[in-house]
Amino acid sequence: MDIGVHTPPLYDRSFEEALSTLSEMGVDAVEPGVGGYPGDEHLSRSEYLDDEDAQAELQDALDEHDMRISALATHNNPLHPDDDQAETADTELREAIELADQLDVNTVTCFSGLPAGGPNDETPNWITAPWPQDHADAHEYQWEDVAIPYWSEIAEVADERGVDVAIEMHPNMLVYEPHGMLRLREATGERIGANFDPSHLYWQGIEITDAIRLLGEEDAIHHFHAKDTKVYEEQAREKGVLDTTAYTEEADRSWIFRSIGYGHGESHWKDVVSTLRMVGYEGALSIEHEDSLTSSLEGLEKAVDMLDRAVFDTQPGDTHWV
């Protein structure tokens, strides 16, 4: 299992400088953004797509720092009711899949997207309850009329390229928890799976190791984001966890993203790593730093330090005691 880093926190330096910094930390893999919310400052699709010379230079830089790319990231909303926004996100995703194939990267990370509640609406609609009936009807429209047809087509594109699509379960997206993830996968095929990010599941009250087992039984974990969350019960008891307070107002929020180990302790993360191994996941633990209480560099350093004590460097040996 590799320790990786999603690289947007290091956009203050060039990609090669970021590789050097991360290599010195002991990082094995990177997940650069190629569009959408992560941006493409480190790996521009227009620069590398169909350019064998640029791709060769990129591989040389990776080899120099003993690094690999675990996934290309393009988190956006291809189901957006605004045609221009949806088209932009769709182009980013399709080109990311194509570039991943050309770079021999087997995974693209993204969001499921979120449609409107009906064909005439203009704003994405995150539905979290089945009543009044309008909401149940809108939810069915989102799945059956928009999401499943779109992701079925993307699954075919990804399969042609031999690339897995790893969807991050995220609030304000149609797929935000494991059962929704499995629903989309069942409807579209095995190329669609999870970019398992526990940070969005903690505050929903989801038990992380149970969710890993649930998705792992279906071989539905294509990538993993190492990111922690701290729930502040004194706030949550008053207003719950569906919190619209600004992320920069940390003291007033029910939960905030934290560096690995600052939301849940070392024993928890060792259990997470062990459960991932139980279900056969041996890919990257890609650290996504979004802790507003520390700098990017210090947050990454502390996360790498903890994960280094949690991951296994060797394959299991014979069970000689049996």
Image: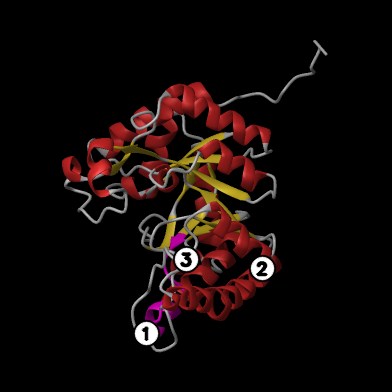
SS for dot 3: loop
Distance between the alpha carbons at the discs numbered 2 and 3: 14 Å
Residue in front for this viewpoint, 46 or 266: 266
Q: Which residue is mark 2?
A: 187
Farthest residue, direction top: 321
Relative vertical location of residue 82 with respect to residue 38 in this rendering, above or below: below
Q: Which residues are magenta?
A: 74-87
Residue 320: horizontal and vertical position, in percent?
81, 12
Q: Quadrant of the C terminus?
A: top right
Q: Quadrant of the N terminus?
A: top right
Distance between the alpha carbons at the discs numbered 1 and 3: 16 Å
- Please, what is the three-letter code of the amino acid marked with disc 2? Ala
Q: Which residue is mark 1?
A: 121
Q: How many marks?
A: 3
Query: Mark 2 or 3 closer to N-term?
Result: 3
Question: Horizontal placement of 13 versus 178: left or right?
Answer: left
Distance between the alpha carbons at the discs numbered 1 and 2: 25 Å
Question: Horizontal placement of 290 versus 249: left or right?
Answer: right
SS for dot 2: helix
- Please, what is the three-letter code of the amino acid marked with disc 3? Leu
Query: Mark 1 or 2 closer to N-term?
Result: 1
Query: Mark 1 or 3 closer to N-term?
Result: 1
Residue 299: horizontal and vertical position, in percent?
31, 34
